[in-house]
Amino acid sequence: MSTLQRLDQFSLAPGQRGRSALTVQLWWMVQGTLFRWSPQVAYGFRRWLLRCFGARVGHKVLIRPTATVTYPWKVEIGDYAWIGDDAVIYSLGPIHIGAHAVVSQRSYLCAADHDAGRPDFPLRERAVRVEEGAWVATDVFVGPGVTIGREAVIGARSSVFRNMPSAMVCHGNPCRPIRPRTATPT
């Protein structure tokens, strides 16, 4: 028998989900039907559904119907942000996505982990922040407790386990800053 990890001893702390089990199940049913089946262009409808379950969603946010939000009441999305297809907002802890930020398709924002040093494997909520104007490109993993700086770019398929600075293009596994992000005149 394992002595380092005893899942029979695991339990969620009281109130850890932030809502009742009934509310959690109701959200998952709504997300799996009305949210998921809504027409691609029904952005306002999906914003409304998220708000009904406590998310703070800004003006003209574009969230695709295949995106997944675990607990909307722990999510804040700023004006004009985009959430791409199959993006996962794993909001066991708080997740903040700033105005004009992009979380591209198949990216995963993970706001919790487990304490592997304890046999009872307790859940640890650790907030994730994607600051204003940042772009998390396709298939990026952003780990618990990470802040993506304002106007940073995180390159495709990166794995981010520490904070990334503002206005930098960052890439890799583990992700690291590569060069400054500069504006191209239009």
Image (cartoon, grey):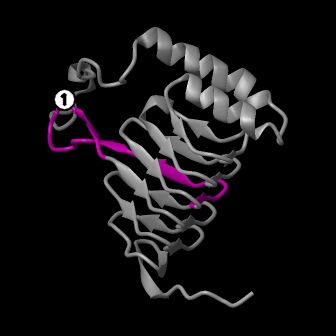
Q: Looking at this view, is 1 or 133 the one in front?
A: 133
Q: Is residue 153 above or below residue 52?
A: below
Residue sitting at 42 percent across and 35 percent down? 74
Q: Is residue 61 left or right of residue 168?
A: right
Q: Nearer the viewer, residue 116 or 23?
A: 23
| Residue pictured at 65% horizontal, 35% vertical | 47
Residue 17 located within the stretch drawn in magenta: no
**Label 1: which secondary element:** loop
Most foreground residue, 186 or 36 = 186
Q: To which quarter of the image does residue 14 belong?
A: top left
Residue at 73% from the left image edge and 36% from the top image edge: 44
Q: Could you tell me residue 73's position as x and y percent?
A: 45, 29
Res. 79 in view: yes
Nearest the viewer among 24 and 132 is 132
- For the N terminus, the image quarter is top left
Q: Which range is magenta?
A: 101-126
Give how far across and how far down residue 45 sits, in percent.
Answer: 73, 31
Which residue ends up furthest to the front in the rendered image?
59
In the picture of the structure, the residue carrying the numbered disc 1 is 120
Residue 37, given in percent of the width and then of the height, sits at 79, 28
Is residue 17 rendered to the left or right of residue 183? left
Count of labels in the image = 1
- Report if residue 118 lies within the magenta region: yes
**Residue 72 placed where, x, y %?**
50, 31
Q: Quadrant of residue 176?
A: bottom left
